[in-house]
Amino acid sequence: MSHPSRHASNLDRTNRTVTSQPPDDSLPGSGRLTQVSFHAAGWCRQSARLAGRPDRGSIRFHAVFVRIEHPTFGTHLIDTGYGPGYLDAIRGFPESILGRLLPTTIGPERSPDEVLRRAGVPLDSIGSILISHFHGDHVGGLDRFPNVRLAARGIAYETPERRGRLGRLMMGYVRELVPSDFAERVDRIDESEFVAGVGLLDGFRVRDHFGDGSLWWVDLPGHAAGHVGFLLRTNDEAIFYVVDACWDVPSTLAGRPMPFVSRRVQFDARAYQATRVRLKAWSERYGRRPIACHCHETLARVADLPD
Ligand SMILES: [Zn+2]
């Protein structure tokens, strides 16, 4: 039998089939994105079992982030992945606990700005960064984009900001990762901006980002305060990027329960489980698969995955 961690890693590498996501006309708005690209900046090691997978050993949790191109509004990112600043931010106690629980690797060449540069994306073309939630593997690279506008749901950062240092840490929120001029740069999204979704997003609370139906914020509660996913529409695809609403799509769609420890680390375990059940129902209703940040299925879409 092969070494367990090698076994799980090999699973990540061999699954290179992009799951098909047909386009959608059931949502309002005729706007479409011209491109949706998946990138990865750093990774941490996670137990395959705690990720919800049947495999033993550990797997890489790649910090995937997304670049979208809009024909009118230009280039924007969803999250940043890790950046080198993350390791500095968690050096002291008690934040160092995060590094012990989830050993993280970020080479200088893997910081999100470098990844984008190599992909031929001029950094000054980035209009804004949409933040799904404030965990280090999603905002750990914000300091690499010092002048870029940010968009975030108010409750996603105000909830942890109301807690003490330990309380914030329990929520996976490291204040040092939030830029010092955050308040001036952020477009704060209020809860009143979310409305009941229709069509493909029936049953979800949603917000139309550009006002043309091309990019939707989707409320996916449980994993972190104010956690959201995104529905991304191009002419060829409608991609439901559910970020961390689930870690492993196959086990979510199979209805496999998460291990106790994995449920305990969620912001709201009950809401998290309810969201997973809703994603399963969504998948069955529409015959589609969601795409999750850390799921091995997503890696087929990441062009420049590190060795
Ligand atoms: Zn997260």
Image: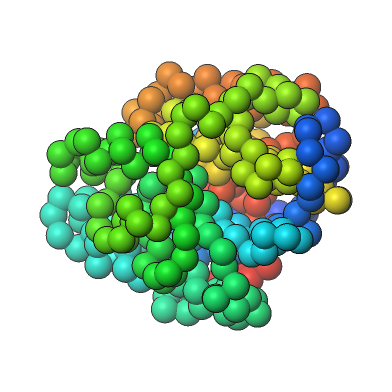
Residue at 42% across, 75% down: 107
Residue at 61% across, 31% down: 206
Residue 123 locus on image (x, y percent): 55, 75
Q: Which of the 4 image quadrants contains residue 240? A: top right
* In the image, residue 192 above or below residue 136: above
Residue at 60% across, 35% down: 207
Tell me, yes or no, if residue 260 can be seen here: no
Q: How many marks?
A: 0
Q: Which of the 4 image quadrants contains residue 266? A: top left
* In the image, residue 249 above or below residue 282: below
Residue 159 locus on image (x, y percent): 30, 34
Between 246 and 210, the one lying in front of the other is: 210
Residue 210 locus on image (x, y percent): 66, 47
* In the image, residue 272 above or below residue 73: above
Left or right of 198? Residue 248 is left
Between 42 and 13, the one lying in front of the other is: 42
Left or right of 225? Residue 129 is right
Tell me, yes or no, if residue 18 can be seen here: yes
Residue at 56% across, 29% down: 194
Residue 307 locus on image (x, y percent): 56, 72
